[in-house]
Image (cartoon, rainbow, N blue to C red):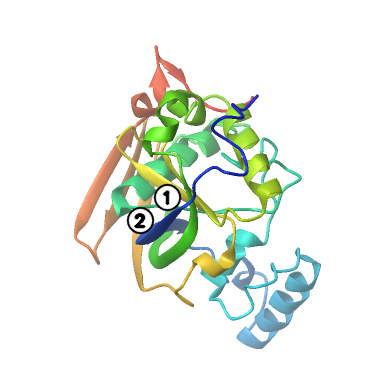
Amino acid sequence: MLDAKRFNDQTSLTDYRAEAWRVVESQEHVATSNIVDDLDEQAVLENLLDEVKPKYRVGTENMHYLLKTAFRYPPLKWGSRFGTQLMPSYFYASETPVVALHECAYYRFLFLDHMAELFLDPVRSEFCLFNVLLASDKCLDLLSDDFLAVQKKVTDPASYAYSQAIGEWAYARKDVAMIRFQSARCSEGVNVAVADPRVIRSRKPKEKISWLCLMNENKVSFSSRESDQYFTFGRDDFSRKDVFLRVGD
């Protein structure tokens, strides 16, 4: 249960303006290119597939697909940090590129753990890191002093119960356009959850950086020729007492 003294109609919302970074897998049209003979056939196939996918959220019509796709699909089995399966999706991003990659690494391990049979060789994949400008005067800042006492429950690495209750409250209140919160996977990281597409002032990514990801059972590494950077994350970064922390099972 949420503390009604903290979460009510008078709860203060603040101004927010900053760039945020998001990581997505670089699938684009690659998934269908291997089953067609030419680009014309691929275009037809992509259009057919698009017709059976969920409709894009109202307000995303003029957005680049990398921005609006986040609002298109409902959360997965366990929901998301602030969204239940019955709620519209949030656009999640991080305030710095490194934190965005840190979050991505966690989900790479999660992906590996759900494989029916473990790959013996490293798994190779490609990702796109991009940034957008966010601006709103309706930001619920969970890092403000008013919410210090509930930080641990908001960022519980193994449960969405409390944070989803906040998300449901924010959705019911209707004027909460975004949420700013501490990352549950990176102790010094800050993330944002955008509920209203209008918060995203960029119509397309301001900058796009390609990253190669190599993953095995205990390590996820990212490298980028464009940025000349390299990052490695270990399974221990997301574990407590040698137990990998995840929501549900």
Reading the image, the residue beneath label 1 is 124
Report the residue that reaches farthest toward the top.
241
**Residue 28 showing in the rendered view:** no
> Considering depth in this image, is 104 or 196 the residue closer to the camera?
196
Q: Secondary structure at mark 1?
A: strand
Residue 3: percent from the left, percent from the top?
A: 59, 26
Residue 212 tag number: 2
Report the residue that reaches farthest toward the left.
228
> Along the horizontal axis of the image, is 157 left or right of 188?
right
Residue 190: percent from the left, percent from the top?
A: 36, 44
Q: How many marks?
A: 2
- First in sequence: mark 2 vs mark 1: 1
> Along the horizontal axis of the image, is 10 left or right of 169?
left
Contact check, label 2 and label 1, Cβ < 8 Å: yes
Q: Residue at x 73, y 76 (%)?
A: 45
Q: Residue at x 35, y 52 (%)?
A: 95
Mark-to-mark CA distance, 2 and 1: 7 Å
Foreground tag (2 vs 1): 2
Above or below, 175 against 160 in this view is below
**Residue 86 showing in the rendered view:** yes
**Which quadrant is home to the N terminus?**
top right
Which quadrant of the view contains residue 148?
Answer: top left
Type of amino acid under label 1: Arg
Badge 2: how crowded within 10 Å, few (<14), some, or many (20+)?
Answer: some
Residue 238: percent from the left, percent from the top?
A: 40, 27
Q: Residue at x 54, y 32 (%)?
A: 6
Q: Secondary structure at mark 2?
A: strand
**Which quadrant is home to the C terminus?**
top right
Residue 167: percent from the left, percent from the top?
A: 62, 42
Above or below, 155 against 90 in this view is above
Q: Residue at x 42, y 43 (%)?
A: 103
Type of amino acid under label 2: Leu
